[in-house]
Amino acid sequence: MSLSLIVILFLLGFAGSFLSGLVGIGGAIINYPLLLYVPAALGVASYTAHEVSGITAVQVFFAALSGALALRKAKVIHYKLVAYMGVAILIGSFGGAYGGKFLSSAGVNTVYAILATLAVVMMFAPKTKTEDLPVDQVRINYGIAVASALLVGGTSGVVGAGGAFLLVPILLTVLKIPTRVTLATSLAITFLSSIGSTIGKVMAGDVLWGPATVLVVASVLAAPLGAKMSGKVPSMVLRTLLVLLIASTAGKVWFEIYTK
């Protein structure tokens, strides 16, 4: 890799991972379109959808791990929910990640666009009324939680994502979990999901280890900073930022799909 490509990948990874830690997602929703479009636009590299999904899977693994570790002492992670949803999403993400090799690049991009659009729609659902509840008082339907995790893992694994961009709206609007508990818990679940996604993408031969390593270094530095900063930002601001991020990336990918 050239020095210019390394610098660009690092900057993209740092920015994407900081934002992912800030809003409680693993980073795929942000880094997938960045890697797909920015290096090509700058003329330093051109990656296929399969390669981007492989790089993203490895990056999400480390970004989610770093972000979750940064919040482990904040007492906002719902560990029982992590256990239930984590196992289900790990199984689903492995199947989706490996199965993605049988789709075309356009198919992978379409899966991403559909998932991102669903996430935006779900974020406009009525806000939970349990915003101020401490983590030990949150009541959860674990059957719905497990079923949701399997579905999210299977679909998001196709694009190398941990699924947090879908998990967050599900936790907020379906399971009615407070925003700060949701953001921290989603990172922990995403970490488990990314294990399955990474293994699946490695087995499928979609991982480019050079670019992935650069993004991992950026993620380890940036994700904890974003996670710590999230505690200083109002919940409504975090929620609005998440909607804007998902909506903008979904729109870009849909535009590319329909103009090619």
Image (cartoon, grey):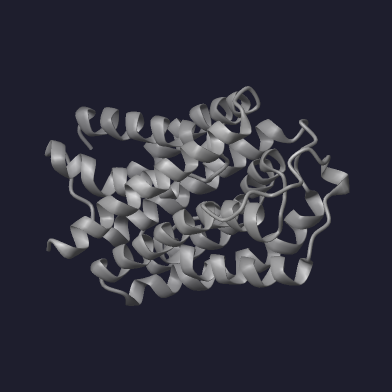
Which of the 4 image quarters holds residue 149? bottom right
Residue 215 in picture, x, y percent from top left: 40, 38
Q: Is residue 260 above or below residue 132?
A: below
Which of the 4 image quarters holds residue 66? top right
Q: In what quadrant of the picture does the N terminus appear?
A: top left
Of 77 and 98, the residue lying toward us: 77
211 relative position to 121: left or right: left
Of 33 and 69, the residue lying toward us: 33
Residue at screen point 61% across, 50% down: 191
Asked if residue 192 can be seen in this view, the reply is no
Q: In what quadrant of the picture does the C terminus appear?
A: bottom left
Residue 153 in picture, x, y percent from top left: 55, 66
Residue at screen point 47% across, 64% down: 157
Residue 85 in picture, x, y percent from top left: 70, 62
Q: Is residue 203 above or below residue 21?
A: below
Residue at screen point 68% across, 38% down: 180
Asked if residue 137 can be seen in this view, the reply is yes
Q: Is residue 216 above or below residue 139?
A: above
Which of the 4 image quarters holds residue 88? bottom right
8 relative position to 123: left or right: left
Residue 70 in picture, x, y percent from top left: 66, 31
206 relative position to 163: left or right: left
